[in-house]
Structure formats: structure tokens, C-alpha cells
Amino acid sequence: MVHLLAFRNKEITKDNILKYEFELLKGPTDFEVDFDCDALLDVSEDKRFNGNSLIVHEKHGAFLVEKTTKELVNEFYKRNTVGFALSKVLANFFSLKHYVPFVFMYVVYMPISGGTRKNTDWIGLHLMNSCRQNKKEAYFITTQGFIIKVTFPKGDLDSRVHDACVLCQKCVAIFLPLIVAGGVDVRGCVFTGLVVKFNTCHCPLHVKVNLENDPKIIGLMFINFIIDHLGIESVNPEEEKKHYRRFLSGRL
């Protein structure tokens, strides 16, 4: 592992990390991906070392792992039990079809290009203080003050971050009232980072954040999403969907 202090006076990039000897890039034994990862960087095309991803971690520093970034982000289900299902439901609500981030309350991992179907770089927006774009490069300053630079091949960085923040805010708007209603004393969040950057935005997407948050409507939204993606191929699919809706709604 390479301590992040080694990058105090230089940017954290794939090339700068891979300049270190392979022995120094070995990660913690039995490491499992967690929400303290600043970035998951795809190096599957680079054959200099035996590894597919570089992890930039708040506590462990920078190190190389054999798993691809696709495999790593799909293992987030171990942390929230539902993986990307929640993110997909939220994205569907806002009709966002591309660059779907991983969202779990205030935790947000944004894909730099593509998504879970292929390997790409992922940035933990909850651990970033700021970001900027310079043509086809994106710069992120972590909450610890380090600069992460990645290639940003397509699109506008602010717009991408904005849309990820919208999903985050919707997630919190849906679940926080339910948690409080269950008697839990909520004291706030230990990290917010860039996910609160657009809290005062009043665009059409942000207006929808505070709409349709009634538990009954939310429950129906999740049920409909699950049913619509079951791939029902019966003679009368609509009737079968009604049966599933009645069953999943918890009614007798």
C-alpha cells in the first residue's frame, strides 16, 4: 500500500500510482470494498502489474487489487443489502438512463463513463470537497485535501455531479422520514462532501425530490419497478402483475 501522504505534492493519477513497485501496491489481506474508498480506478487494460483496479482509500492509501471495478461496485450490496437496485429505482423515477451512480443515503459513487455493465473509474462524491473539469480531464479534491485526476471523456462534469446529487437527495427524502417515524434518533451524517453541493438548486429535477414521498406511493414505485423487470411471459402478463402487486404490497 502507498500512503496517501506520498501524493501530498502531486496529483493522484493511475500513472503516478503505478510508478511504485508492485510489492508496495499490494493491498490489505482479505480487503472488502467499503464506503471509505475515495476512488476505484480501472487499470484492466494496463498489463504492467497483476491487477485490474487501483483503490484509493481514506485509511489504507492506494493499492492494487485483482477484481475489476465492475466487480467491486457490484459488491456494495454487502454494505446495503440491495446493491444497485435502489439506485436503479431512483434513476427510473427521474428518467435518468445513463451514468447511473451507486446511491445509498449520503453515500454516492459516480461512474466517470459507462456504468456497471463495464469497467470504468468511480469517484466517491461523499468524500470529495470540490471538483472541476478541464476539457477531457476531471479533478477532484478529497476531504483530506488530496487531488485525484481522471480522464473524463464525455459530457459536463457539473451536470453529472448534479444528477448524482439529485438521486442522493431523493434517497434521503424517502427514507429519513421512515427512519425517524420508527423511533430512531437521527443525528446527521458523518460525511456529505459534494453530495450537498446542489441542495439549493431549484431545477425541475430537484423540484421532484420533494414530490411523491408518501410511503404508499414510494412502496408502489418500488413494487412496480420490480414487477416491470421480472420478465413475465405468461398469456396474461397484466393479470399476473396485479397478483404480484397485491402480494408484494403486504395486503391479505
Image (cartoon, grey):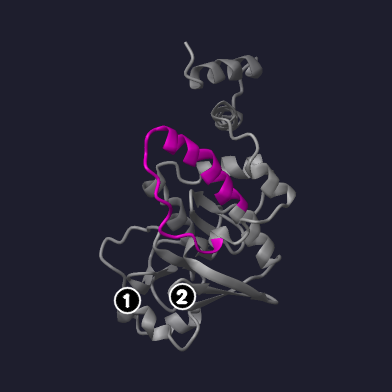
State the residue at coordinates (45%, 61%). Answer: 68
- Residue 220 horizontal/vertical position (percent): 58, 27
How many residues crowd mark 2 within 10 Å: few (<14), some (14–19), many (20+)?
Answer: few
Discs 2/1, front: 1
Q: Is residue 82 left or right of residue 215?
A: left
State the residue at coordinates (62%, 45%). Answer: 91
Vertical placement of residue 17 versus 91, above or below: below
- Residue 139 horizontal/vertical position (percent): 58, 75
Vertical placement of residue 161 versus 174, above or below: below
Q: Which mark is residue 47?
A: 2
Residue 46 magenta-drawn? no
State the residue at coordinates (38%, 65%). Answer: 66
Task: Give the image quarter of residue 17.
Answer: bottom left
Region of the chain picked out in magenta, as a range:
166-194
| Callout 2 touching callout 1 (CB < 8 Å) | no
Vertical placement of residue 247 versus 218, above or below: above
To which residue does mark 1 refer?
1
In terms of depth relative to the viewer, which is nearer, 219 or 50? 219
Residue 193 magenta-drawn? yes
In terms of depth relative to the viewer, which is nearer, 70 or 84? 84
Secondary element at tag 2: loop
